[in-house]
Amino acid sequence: MSRSPLGLVVVGIALSVPSAASAGPPSLPSEDRSGAVGAPGEVEDPGGVPPTDSGAASAEVNASAAVSVPRPSATLDLGDPAVDPAPATGEKPGRSDKRGNKPAADASTSDDPAMIGGRREPAINTVRGGLGLFGTSLADVGGRHSVRFGLHTDLFRRSGFIYDSARFGTDTNSRFRGTVNIGYSPFRWGEIYMSIASQANRSEREQPGRQDPITTFALGDIDLGIKGAHRFYRGGAIGLGGQLGLGLLSGARRFSSERVNFNIDALFTLDARYLTSRRFPFRFTTNIGWILDNSLKLVDWGAIADTTSREVHRFALGVNHSRVRMRYGVDFPIRLGKDRRFGLDPIAELAWDVSTRGQDTLFSQPDAVPSPLPRSSLWATLGLRANVISGLHLDLALDIGMISPNFEFGPPVPPWQLLFGLGWAFDPLPVIREVPAPVSEAPPPPPALDGRIVGAVVDESGAPIGGVKISFPGVTSTAIVADAAGSFTSFRFPEGQVQVVLEAPNGARAQALADLRAGEDVALTFTIEGGLVAPSGVLDGAFVDDGGAPVQATLQITGQGIDEPFTSTPEGLIRVELPAGDYSGALRADGYEPKSVRFTITSGQEMIPLRVVLTRDVPIATPGVSGNERGIRLKRAIAFKGDELSDKSLPILDELAAFLKGHPEFQEIEIGAHTDDSGNPGKRTQDRADAVRTYLLSKGVSPDRVSAKGYGDRSPVAVNLTASGRAKNNRVVLKVVRYAK
């Protein structure tokens, strides 16, 4: 067996490479036909108008004589709009938007050389990693929410690659690899990616006792990674970032992850397009990191006694050692055609791996010629990437092997390898453009001389009333508030009639019409009778039974913004001061039928009498209801028609209301509704519980004794897969919350 030497290929980047290196594995001595060690075999080398005082008109309005007028047709002018120098995107000039993109007037005049037609220039991922070149990741993640998809394949073929015997001849080794890569940038500074790679290796040789198959398949290794990067300095000239990755290794037996690799890398990119006036298309990128490689654990190498078979099998599976990885790349992203929508990107890369694993004597080869850098794998890549149609990319590259490590530190480096690729990049977000405002040389129009209303709000004595809201219906929805001195100044309105409406904090209202004239202020005074004291009266109530005995009761008063319960004295008397207006009331007392009343509070009348005779409840039997401190049980379930009560359930609910009124020890109960998992369980159960509570209140049950809660489908008592199970889950549970023993 032997390894063939190759000359160094010099890559034009600022990195010195050790000299005197070989492209293939370190050579082994050849064998003669008798098995004696001889000389090495020869192998061929391969490559925002202030107020005006011009005139004023005055008017006085009394709030006791409100005026009703049709709404005038007018528009609101709040002055000339201010000029906003910032771009329409809301970003400061020169800043990137939330996508990581920069606004552009058009594709040819953008301040960002990486913008094409209002989007980030399309780019694709490396063969097995994040956004980058062929093997070197850029310190960039592309436009936010951009998606990248790539297909790559590489191949090589070489005679005398690992085995070279004077007696049995040389081997012919061929390898074919394929990779699918998907990348997505969910954040402005973040990217996630995944790749799946498989390979097939064929080693043909006439070697007696070989222990490796002629063809070896490595099935579906999966790489998962996350990358973060930030571009800064002059809009993005410098990029810094890092990436973390996991590799799920399948081996050759089945498509199932058997081992896991881990890698971490630091990323740096310098983009000269942001540093040069002519936007010279040049980028330098470097990655430095380390990979914990567990691929050696895929095979029991001790079971392969033949050293050549062991080495070929290691290479065929792509097995390697834990190592430091260094990548250096330069590229020249040239944009061509109309609006620079097409691109060519010549790329040169240098890859240098250094094994961090101890010397593995299992893979040692007797009499092998040592490598000049025993732990190093070194190769260069020269290639071209073309962005042919929108986000469609085509790749073509050649890997040139430069140094292979000693057998104890890693597999051989192929002397050459041809790479083909197809990629597609998609940016789903809309194009962001900055459209410059048209420049007009015409003189600015004269300021609009619209009129204003300068007003005051006072009481009968002339004392100011502050805090009054003033609105202008039909003209603007924006209202203003009079200050502590009762003064206010309106917006500027066009000439004509403007309706003015006042609303005091106590609810008193007034309205008037103001005739506005261009360039003048109209003075308007509003007088509110009684100031801020709204007219009111006192309700004088008395509640008795059929025999004239007083009854203590609760009156729920509703009207004029009031909806509150008021409880009488034990003598059945109640007095409540209320604002003038119409009211309704619901009267309840234990042991008496509920009663509805209506009354009107009249301003100036000192007392408004209300006398109500209550009728005792006729107790009804409640055989269908029973209960104790733990709960209340009904002999008939409460049924619903949709979310409303079914008429069939009203008799049992009448019994429940009578039971509660006859048993004050049940101080508070909860109506809990449950249902199955169809539709909107939460809303359905709450509506049903509320319907039961509303019916009980209509039957005289005190509101503070009943609460309602919908539990949705959280507490099933049967499975929802059958009709009977769903029927059981649709139920109402009456729970006792407070009970007086």
Image: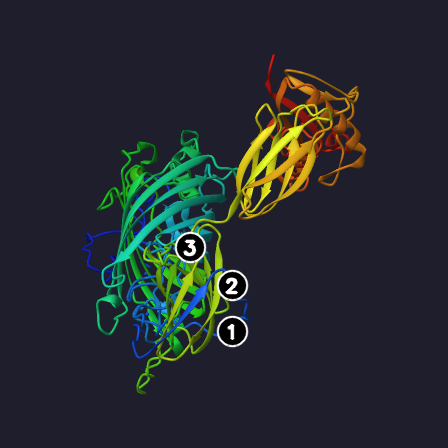
Going by the numbered disc 1, the residue's amino acid type is Pro
Q: Is residue 245 visible?
A: yes
Residue denoted by label 1: 72
Disc on res. 158:
none
Q: Quick check: marks 1 and 3 in contact, CB under 8 Å? A: no
Judged from the image, the secondary structure of the residue bearing numbered disc 3 is strand
Residue denoted by label 3: 157
Residue denoted by label 2: 66
Q: Closer to us: mark 2 or mark 3?
A: 2
Going by the numbered disc 3, the residue's amino acid type is Arg
Farthest-out residue, top: 741
Going by the numbered disc 2, the residue's amino acid type is Ala
Residue toward you, 482 or 325:
482
702 relative to 678, above or below:
above
Q: Position of residue 223 (x, y in %)?
A: 43, 45
Q: Quadrant of residue 552?
A: top right
Q: Is residue 652 left or right of residue 184?
A: right
Q: Closer to us: mark 1 or mark 3?
A: 1
Q: Is residue 460 left or right of residue 691?
A: left
Farthest-out residue, right: 648
Q: Is residue 104 left or right of residue 590?
A: left
Residue toward you, 166 or 113:
113
Q: Closer to us: mark 1 or mark 2?
A: 2
Tell me the distance, in whole angstroms, between the alpha carbons under discs 1 and 2. Answer: 17 Å
Q: Earlier in the sequence, mark 2 or mark 3?
A: 2
Q: Position of residue 87 (x, y in %)?
A: 33, 68
Tell me the distance, in whole angstroms, between the alpha carbons under discs 2 and 3. Answer: 100 Å
Q: Earlier in the sequence, mark 1 or mark 2?
A: 2
Q: Position of residue 341 (x, y in %)?
A: 40, 73
Q: Quadrant of the N terminus?
A: top left
